[in-house]
Amino acid sequence: MYRVEHDGRADLVYVAGPANDRWAFANGEVYRDKRELPRTRRASGGDATETLTAPMPATVLKVLIAPGSQVKSGDALIVLEAMKMEIALRAPHDGTVTAINCREGELVQPDSVLVELKST
């Protein structure tokens, strides 16, 4: 845990993970180095499918979408609870939900694929 002071205010930033895979939680947002964690793969036919993964060990509080749902960039898809904080996983772009690989109440581990999205 770090106390970060900037612009006349102080925030707490929580940092965890091994040296090659750090994540940070600050002001309700999760930040993670994505260089070593490829999240996009090519499906047959050249369509891009992106997987959204758990950023840390967490419990799935709410699943807000269903397979086939149309989502817009920034829409909350899954709400996780970790370290007594709620974390919303949001759509990185407009798309269609192709699969949901978790259920409410489930404990998920880091890098577990929770949602698969196809770009529109």
Image: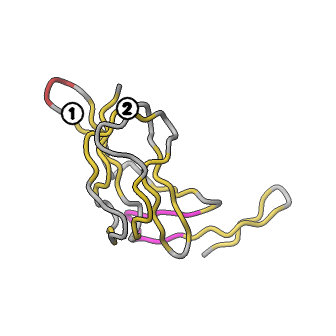
Horizontal arrangement in the rendering, residue 36 relative to residue 27 (left or right): left
Q: Amino acid at mark 1?
A: Arg
Query: Residue 19 is drawn in which quadrant?
Result: bottom left
In the rendered image, residue 89, in percent from the top left (x then y), is placed at 46, 52
Query: Residue 5 is drawn in which quadrant?
Result: bottom right
Give the residue drawn at x 45%, y 39%: 92
Query: Residue 43 is drawn in which quadrant?
Result: top left
In the rendered image, residue 53, in percent from the top left (x then y), is placed at 34, 55
Name the residue beneath numbered marker 2. Answer: 95
Q: Residue furthest left?
A: 44
Q: Is residue 106 above or below residue 6?
A: below
Q: Amino acid at mark 2?
A: Gly
Considering the image in quadrants, where does the N terminus appear? bottom right
Give the residue drawn at x 52%, y 75%: 83
Between 98 and 45, the one lying in front of the other is: 98
Q: Is residue 18 magenta?
A: yes
State yes or no: discs 2 and 1 in contact (Cβ < 8 Å).
Answer: no
Looking at the rendered structure, the secondary structure element under dot 1 is strand
Q: Is residue 39 magenta?
A: no
How many badges with numbers are in the image? 2
Label number found at residue 115: none
Read off the magenta span. 15-25
| Mark 1 crowd level (few <14, some 14–19, many ≥20, 10 Å Cα) | few
Q: Earlier in the sequence, mark 2 or mark 1?
A: 1
Looking at the rendered structure, the secondary structure element under dot 2 is strand
Label number found at residue 42: 1
Instruction: Please state which of the two labelled residues, at mark 2 or mark 1, is closer to the viewer.
Output: 2
Between 6 and 92, the one lying in front of the other is: 92
Q: CA distance from mark 2 to mark 1?
A: 15 Å
The scheme the figure's colours follow is secondary structure
Q: Is residue 28 above or below residue 109?
A: above
Give the residue drawn at x 43%, y 60%: 62
